[in-house]
Amino acid sequence: MATRNEQGVDPKIAAVVAAAEAAGPAAGENVRIDSWIWAVRLVKTRSIGATACRGGHVRVNGERVKPAHSVRIGDEVRLRHEGRERIVVVKRLIRKRVGAPVAAQCYIDNSPPPPPREAVAPIGIRDRGTGRPTKRDRRELERLRDLGSRPRER
């Protein structure tokens, strides 16, 4: 088992963080917000990060930003993604995508906890092996899926 230093950080993680910072921006250089949220694993791909910025789902210090916006240490980044809002404060600037334990060292997560899994149960999913739905079952599934999307016709 690895020993921990005085700060409570695993030496392996500290070494990878140091390598990520060395590969990060030089003094006076900037890091784009779409690149940063991808590098710290808030989104899966950089293009998803850019699309989120263009769609107004990313805010830095309360302002909607474009994908090329420069992020600085201490900025508060709010990201609405996959039905959840993430609120993080930038601790380190990195450009390259790093592992999850290292990425967690690059920001302070102030996000509200995710909803419990039971509360987010998928609507209209049938148990495996129950066979083909009857006409009545199918109508109930369609009613659940369309819940509130359009008025019922009579």
Image: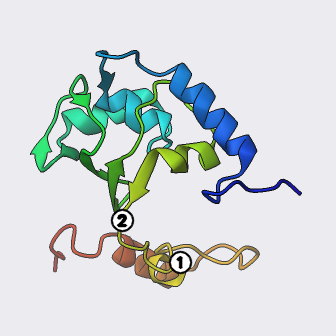
Task: Identify residue for label 2.
Answer: 111
Crowdedness near tag 1: few (<14), some (14–19) or many (≥20) residues, C-alpha within 10 Å: few
Marks counted in the figure total: 2
Q: Position of residue 22 (x, y in %)?
A: 54, 21
Closer to the camera in the image, 78 or 149? 78
Q: Establish if 61 lies above or below 51.
A: below
Closer to the camera in the image, 12 or 88? 12
The amino acid sitting under disc 2 is Ser
Asked where in the image residue 33 lies, by quadrant, the reply is top left
Closer to the camera in the image, 26 or 54? 26
Seen at 76% across and 75% down, the residue is 129
Figure quadrant of the N terminus: bottom right
Asked where in the image residue 140 lies, by quadrant, the reply is bottom left
Seen at 30% across and 20% down, the residue is 30
Figure quadrant of the C terminus: bottom left
Side of 140 where 88 appears, left or right: left
Q: Position of residue 40 (x, y in %)?
A: 48, 40
- Label 1: state its secondary structure: helix
Question: First in sequence: mark 2 or mark 1?
Answer: 2
Task: Identify residue for label 1.
Answer: 117
Q: Establish if 21 lies above or below 112.
A: above
